[in-house]
Each structure stands twice: as structure tokens, then as C-alpha cells.
Amino acid sequence: MINNPSHPKKGHLKSKDCKFSKAGFEYIDYKQTDILERFINDQGKMLPRRVTGTSAKHQRQLSLAVKRARFLGLIPYVTENLR
């Protein structure tokens, strides 16, 4: 990768840290719907890693937990305004 000092975003990029690693999560549980809803947008879609800053390991656990919570009816598949 070539460094370009005249690039407009040079020096303005901040590294995103995994919120789950900071908080010391070993496992993301599907029953913690308050945590899972933070990683879902207003349409009911899961937010990607590049937006949330989660690690790959925790993103996989997060997606599995969201899918399980949706299947059990703890989290809706879509929001009320889209039905």
C-alpha cells in the first residue's frame, strides 16, 4: 500500500476496538436481546463489522445469536413500519 500524504482522510482514521473484547465477553448469548438490538439497524438487518468494529470471532457469535433470537421470537425479523 502506498502512503499518500495529500489524501483527505490521512491522519483522520481511528481504529475501532471490539466492544465485546473490551467488556470481557467470552460468549454472546441469544437471550441478551438488549445487547443484540444495538447491532441491528432500524430495518432489522445486522450491522457489518466495518460499521460496528467487532472482531471476526465476535461477529460470528453475534450473527448466530441474532439468528437464534429471531427464530425463538425474541427479536423480530423486520420492524413494525416495514410490515
Image (cartoon, rainbow, N blue to C red):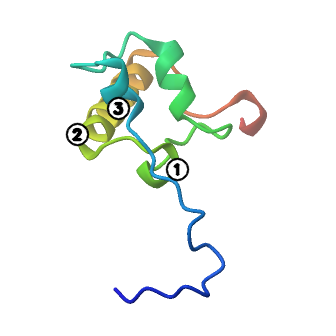
- Residue type of the residue flagged with mark 2: Lys
Left or right: where does residue 3 sit relative to residue 64?
Answer: right
Q: Count the marks: how many?
A: 3
Q: Are marks 2 and 3 in contact (CB under 8 Å)?
A: no
Q: Which residue is mark 1?
A: 51
Whether residue 74 is visible here, answered yes or no, is no
Is 21 situated above or below 46?
above
Mark 3 and mark 1 lie on one chain; the one further toward the N terminus is 1
**Image x and y of residue 54, in percent:** 38, 41
Is 19 situated above or below 14?
above
Whether residue 44 is visible here, answered yes or no, is yes
Q: Which mark is residue 78?
A: none
Q: Which residue is mark 2?
A: 57
Question: Among all residues in the image, which is located at the extreme top?
Answer: 31
Left or right: where does residue 58 sit relative to residue 41?
Answer: left
Q: Are marks 3 and 1 in contact (CB under 8 Å)?
A: no
**Residue pictured at 62% horizontal, 39% vertical:** 41
- Residue type of the residue flagged with mark 3: Leu
How crowded is the residue under tag 2: few (<14 C-alpha within 10 Å), some, or many (20+)? few
Residues at marks 1 and 2, CA–CA distance in whole angstroms: 15 Å
- Residue type of the residue flagged with mark 1: Val
Towards the viewer: 80 or 30: 30
Q: Which mark is residue 62?
A: 3
How crowded is the residue under tag 1: few (<14 C-alpha within 10 Å), some, or many (20+)? few
Towards the viewer: 29 or 69: 29
